[in-house]
């Protein structure tokens, strides 16, 4: 990493250094399978169980080192913790009490032959938790939480449709939902961006406090974190046959392959141009500007839903 400009903010360095790894994971067969909703309900539930073990290990490690200078700026379990939501979703999908899903057949089978990618991931998190300097745990927070705040929102609708879940109630898909930064309300897409901005500020603060040493450790660990996550997706494609493989779509194709009428496209373009004009003329800074952004976001969402049905 001799060519890295360590004077840059840590969040910028992470984005630039992991861009290729991110795209590789996003276009993996496992990611396509998840986005296509082609996992059986049991397979999807098993995947959530795997994620629960990862988040349980990560969030216990973050709690243990909550006051560490590299981890404290982004430590907010009330906002970010995913293990509780995963546990709730698993129990709902299995239709069992949340206190009992760990004794369910699917989970017992998972434990009896724990897949290597899961064990490797858990082992790495525990190694960092037990090390004298746990700063590299920040890389795993970055990869997992920012991924959930971004790509996870695309998956939410697919999952609800694939397993006949009520998207409005959120039951069974709470893993993909976050609360607002300063309230218990569910976060909109605009608020998700605000959360991500807050998280990046925390990452940059950790980088400023830790200097080159911490930045180097976090960058190196982020590359490993993406590889570990790719290993989890590899588990999803083990059952694919050639026919199913041909039907998969990537996160990018999901948007590219859907066609719309010329009138619909023109309507959306006109709406975007108008909203841009309103924001530029009226201003979009400060709290009032943020409220304008949310209002425009809702307006565009309603318009898009009306023409895409």
Image (cartoon, helix red, strand yellow):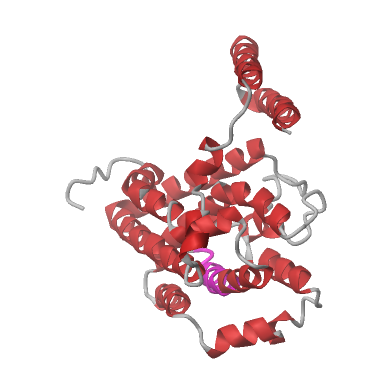
Where is residue 146? Give x, y as percent: 52, 51
Q: Kindly report the secondary structure that dominates the magenta region of the rendered protein.
A: helix
Figure label count: 0
Magenta-tinted stretch = 52-67
Residue 301 at x, y percent in the picture: 70, 31
- Nearest the viewer among 160 and 299 is 160
Answer with left or right where residue 166 lies relative to residue 177.
Answer: right
Please identify the quadrant where the C terminus is shown: top right
x, y percent for residue 12: 37, 42
72 falls in the magenta region? no
Figure quadrant of residue 258: top right
Taking the spot 73% from the left edge, 32% from the top edge, the residue there is 305
Verify whether residue 56 appears in magenta.
yes
Residue 176 falls left or right of residue 57? right
Q: Position of residue 25 (x, y in %)?
A: 42, 55
| Residue under the point 66% across and 59% down | 175
Q: Is residue 302 above or below residue 129?
A: above
Kindly tell me whether residue 256 is visible in this rendering: yes
Toward the bottom, the furthest residue is 112
Q: Is residue 154 left or right of residue 216?
A: right
Taking depth in this image into account, of 257 and 235 the one nearest to the observer is 257
């Amino acid at each position: 990493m001799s060519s890295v400009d360590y004077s840059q903010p840590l969040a910028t360095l992470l984005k630039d250094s992991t861009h290729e790894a991110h795209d590789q994971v996003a276009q993996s067969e496992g990611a396509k399978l998840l986005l296509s909703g082609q996992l059986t309900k049991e397979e999807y539930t098993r995947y959530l169980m795997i994620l629960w073990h990862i988040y349980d290990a990560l969030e216990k490690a973050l709690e243990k080192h909550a006051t560490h200078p590299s981890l404290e700026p982004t430590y907010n379990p009330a906002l970010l913790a995913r293990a509780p939501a995963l546990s709730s979703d698993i129990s709902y999908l299995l239709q069992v009490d949340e206190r009992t899903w760990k004794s369910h057949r699917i989970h017992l089978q998972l434990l009896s032959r724990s897949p290597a990618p899961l064990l490797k991931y858990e082992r790495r998190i525990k190694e960092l938790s037990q090390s004298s300097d746990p700063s590299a745990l920040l890389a795993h927070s970055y990869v997992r939480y920012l991924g959930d705040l971004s790509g996870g929102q695309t998956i939410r609708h697919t999952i609800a449709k694939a397993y006949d879940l009520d998207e409005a109630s959120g039951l069974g898909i709470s893993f993909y939902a976050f609360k607002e930064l300063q309230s218990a309300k569910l976060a909109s897409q605009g608020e998700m961006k605000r959360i991500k901005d807050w998280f990046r500020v925390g990452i940059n603060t950790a980088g400023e406090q830790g200097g080159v040493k911490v930045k180097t450790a976090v960058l190196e660990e982020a590359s490993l974190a993406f590889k570990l996550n790719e290993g989890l997706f590899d588990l999803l494609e083990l059952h694919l046959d050639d026919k199913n493989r041909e039907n998969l779509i990537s996160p990018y194709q999901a948007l590219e392959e859907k066609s719309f009428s010329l009138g619909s496209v023109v309507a959306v373009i006109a709406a975007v141009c108008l909203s841009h004009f309103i924001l530029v003329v009226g201003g979009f800074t400060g709290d009032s500007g943020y409220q304008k952004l949310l209002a425009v976001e809702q307006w565009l969402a309603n318009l898009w839903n009306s023409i895409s049905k």
